[in-house]
Image (cartoon, rainbow, N blue to C red):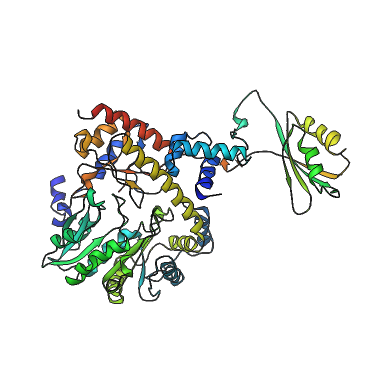
Amino acid sequence: MKHVQQQYISKTASQLKPSGIRKFFDLASQMDNVISLGVGEPDFVTPWNVCEAGYASLESGYTAYTANAGLLELREEISSYLLEQFSLHYSAESQIILTVGASQAIDLAFRAVINPGDEVIIVEPGFVAYAPAVTLAGGTPVSLETKAEDEFKITRESLEKAITKRTKAILLCFPSNPTGATMSESELKSVTDVIEKHDLLVLSDEIYAELTYDETHYSIARINGMRERTILISGFSKAFAMTGWRLGYVTGPEEIIAAMLKIHQYTMMCAPTIAQHGALEALKSGREDLERMKKSYRQRRNFLVKSFNNIGLSCHMPGGAFYAFPSIQATGMTSDEFAEKLLEEERVAVVPGHVFGAGGEGYVRCSYATSIDSLQEAVKRIERFVSRHQQA
Amino acid sequence: MNEKEIEILEILEENARIPMDVLADMVELSVEEVEKTIKRLEEQNIILNYSSVINWDKTSGKDGVAAMIDVKVTPKREVGFDEIAERIYRFPEVKAVYLMSGAFDLSVQIEGKTMKEVAFFVSNKLSTLDSVLSTTTHFLLKKYKHDGVIFEPEQKDKRIVVSP
């Protein structure tokens, strides 16, 4: 029966590779006493006032669809939030769509701009969903590998090298999952003329924009000549600890947003109403909670990165997100071996770097969105593991 | 008071048993610097004590009752409420004393072994003080949250164990 069913599955779907993270999820979920540094979301639960706003919206009967683009009141709030926090000007009426997580925004953006054969540059190591999203939209993902010696930032040279005649767009994600890399104003400006010269579209996934610890986030859309060619994607998941609410948004040039809205209205109708009411509260009065969580991430980052360097896993100081990306080369293992053995022998779950694409091999992703007590215990276990396996 | 000192205080307030080297890494100072800072904060009576939050309801062999007493008093010239507050907080069974705005003046928290013991304290020790005009005693039935700690917490991490 099984092979009969197989014939119904589309070529695109059957050629899609399952995420490398899945394997570790299956392994780790069968074990007890696992400390997981493999979780890509905040350890905080959503601030209570946001949850209350969700309840209140249900009690008031807000259980119907919203406008396709989302509640106008929320789009207005996002518009002023982007202006206040990041000096970005976007119209609530014509340039913002609320989406089901930033993930849907990425999917929408690619579907709205890619023609068959178009190439999209993906910065790697990078989030696992970008390349498949390009493929599903009919495009070809092209990897731009970033390196530890550049602190996983893109450079003019690496960018030039990835560009071909068919390159349509580049996807940026800074602060980065999994490397935690950030790019400052001047670092961004050092590559924007290349982007302009080749007339590329920019998809900037700034979901971690609020979680930067050393410098304030600077959006590429602020740079002259970039705003007209940048689709900016963000959401509430990371900054406000709202991953399960599934609410993101996308802003950009009017024509592109209009094209995305057409797809969105047919395929999604609108983002969840209850989540939109929660998000409204988060923007109106979530700043204090956000700062509290951010402070805690920063403290835990400092501890974890210092500890990794102390125990012989060389690790750059990530400027944002909540991931450390230490090198495991001292053990001589592949990232898969490292992650599997660490899980088996010491019950610590990390994500092998290779699942994040080119340049990820030789590293593992460790989330510090977990309690300081768990981080201390994890470091102890990893230290034991590394000293046992360190190459002479 | 600088930012690092406040950060140290916040971390200690949440977990006074945090190892010094971990605390030092978290705030990006050396262990010596952190220890010196903490010592100074102790000397300045900014850090007063390191105590634990205990759920005595879960223990056996140590039963007790607690009450919050609203106390109305006559403040005195020169010393205001401070003198009467001190006369109250000196009793060892008194766990906390706060000066309040509103319908009464002092909020007094007391713990005793039995209800009788608390009643005895109120009628014989507290009410008999010269400045005390009246008392209203509320017995505490159940503690849900104390000093920011939830007593029956669902500590389980509800996240899936590995995610992108």
Q: Nearer the viewer, residue A217 or B158?
A: A217
Q: Nearer the viewer, residue A117 or A58?
A: A117
Residue A1 visible somewhere in the drawing? no
Q: Position of residue A84 (x, y in %)?
A: 44, 68
Count of all numbered marks drawn on residues in the image: 0
Q: Position of residue A63 (x, y in %)?
A: 46, 63
Q: Position of residue B157 (x, y in %)?
A: 43, 41
Please determine whether, in this image, residue B59 is positioned above or below residue A42: above
Q: Is residue B47 left or right of residue A326?
A: right
Q: Quadrant of residue B117?
A: top right
Residue A220 visible somewhere in the drawing? yes
Residue at 32% over, 38% down: A308
Q: Quadrant of the N terminus of chain A?
A: top left
Q: Nearer the viewer, residue B66 or A330?
A: A330
Q: Quadrant of residue A115?
A: bottom left
Please determine whether, in this image, residue A96 is positioned above or below residue B21: below
Judged from this view, the residue extending furthest toward the top is: B61
Q: Is residue A278 left or right of residue A32?
A: right
Q: Is residue A392 left or right of residue A262?
A: left
Q: Position of residue B97 (x, y in %)?
A: 73, 42
Q: Quadrant of the C terminus of chain A?
A: top left
